[in-house]
Image (spheres, grey):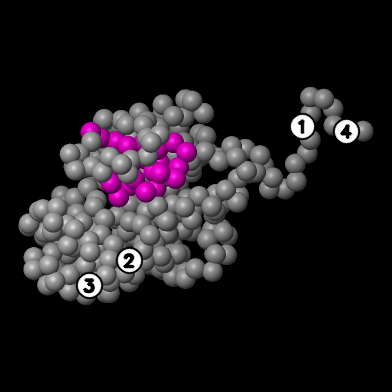
Amino acid sequence: MGPARNEAPKCPLGCENRMRMKIVVFSDLDATLLDAETYSWKSAEGGIDALKKREASLVMVTSKTLSEVGWLHEEVGFDDPFVFENGGGIAFRKETPVSEYLLSRGSKIDEFQGEGFAVVALGTRYEVLVKSLAEISAEVGTPLLGFSAMSDEEVAKATGLPAEQAAKARMRLFDEPFVTLERSKSLEAEIQDAAIRRGLDVVKGGRFWHLIGHGGKGKAVSILLEGFRKRYSELVSIGLGDSPNDFPFLQIVDIPVVLGKPLKTEPVLSLPERAHRHQVPGPKGWNRAVLDILATL
């Protein structure tokens, strides 16, 4: 005899995860979850609490370093992986929902004991990027000032970060942020071409250009999406960002959101067609967007 009509059939151990809809939010940090001036996320507390009540996942996707994001990851209170240095690495705790998938991929896994995370290394190592940036600078005949050539105090002044956080921002593994005093479309094209000839890429963030040797935020998010899909049969992915280097991962989520007013230099063609535009930037806009989306799910 089968189960009574009003009684749910018993579920094998672990199948609850595969039966329940899983919400996964992929979020940029600067000028998105974090305020561009104060770096606070407190205005997004309502949305954060709502995600926790829905047992949703929050995956941070940022240009920040492992050292910068580790404490924030703990403070916000999610145990999900996060993408750092524009997709150069994926950091995760072992024995969390998608860790088994990440460990099974055969990728190089680095252990960062001081931070307590395992890291899937996706990018060209930092020392190679620093050398390449110096070569590109000489080739285009214009100074390109990277974080490696700046002091903690100079990075603090350029970013508005406290000195302690600026020091963490310089502890890089896969991404060299840089600035140039000269701005022109022709120079940008020259820098990009010089990077491509070296098997590298240049992406534009909110404050800096970044020299990278990997597939960017989009590649890292695609890996994590695959991991979540293997664990949950019904998945809704939400993405939030504010600048062009976020667009690749916004292209591959179910519900993409762009915060802030469009920039004159924003490459409109790379914006996801389905993107929701919230003109309020930072955590206030993030909070409103997340609450609005959750109300529809």
Q: CA distance from mark 3 to mark 4?
A: 68 Å
Which residue lies under the disc numbered 3? 132
Nearest-to-viewer mark from 3 and 4? 3
The residue lying at 62 percent from left, 38 percent from top is 20
Q: Examine the structure image and report whether residue 245 is included in the region drawn in magenta.
A: yes
Magenta-span inclusion, residue 186: no
For label 2, the crowd category at 10 Å Cα-Cα, with few meaning under 14, some 14 to 19 and many 20 or more, is many
Q: Earlier in the sequence, mark 4 or mark 2?
A: 4
- Residue 158 in the figure: left or right of residue 92: left
Disc 1 to disc 3, C-alpha distance? 61 Å
The label shown at residue 2 is 4
Q: Earlier in the sequence, mark 3 or mark 2?
A: 3
- In this rendering, the label closer to the viewer, 2 or 1: 2
> Which residue was labeled with disc 1?
8
Give the alpha-carbon distance from disc 3 to disc 2, as whole Å: 11 Å
Q: Which mark is residue 230?
A: none
The image shows residue 290 at horizontal and vertical percentages of 40, 32
Q: Please, what is the three-letter code of the amino acid marked with disc 3?
A: Ser
Tags 4 and 2 touching, CB below 8 Å? no
Q: Tag 1: residue type? A: Ala
| Left or right: residue 132 compared with residue 185 | right
Measure the alpha-carbon separation of dots 4 and 1.
10 Å
Q: Which residues are magenta?
A: 239-261
Q: Amino acid at mark 2?
A: Gly
Q: Secondary structure at mark 2?
A: loop
Q: Would you say residue 191 is visible in this rendering?
A: yes
What label does residue 213 carry, if any?
A: 2
Secondary structure beneath dot 1 equals: loop
Q: Residue at x 47, y 38 (%)?
A: 254
The first of marks 4 and 1 along the sequence is 4
Disc nearer the start of the sequence (3/4): 4
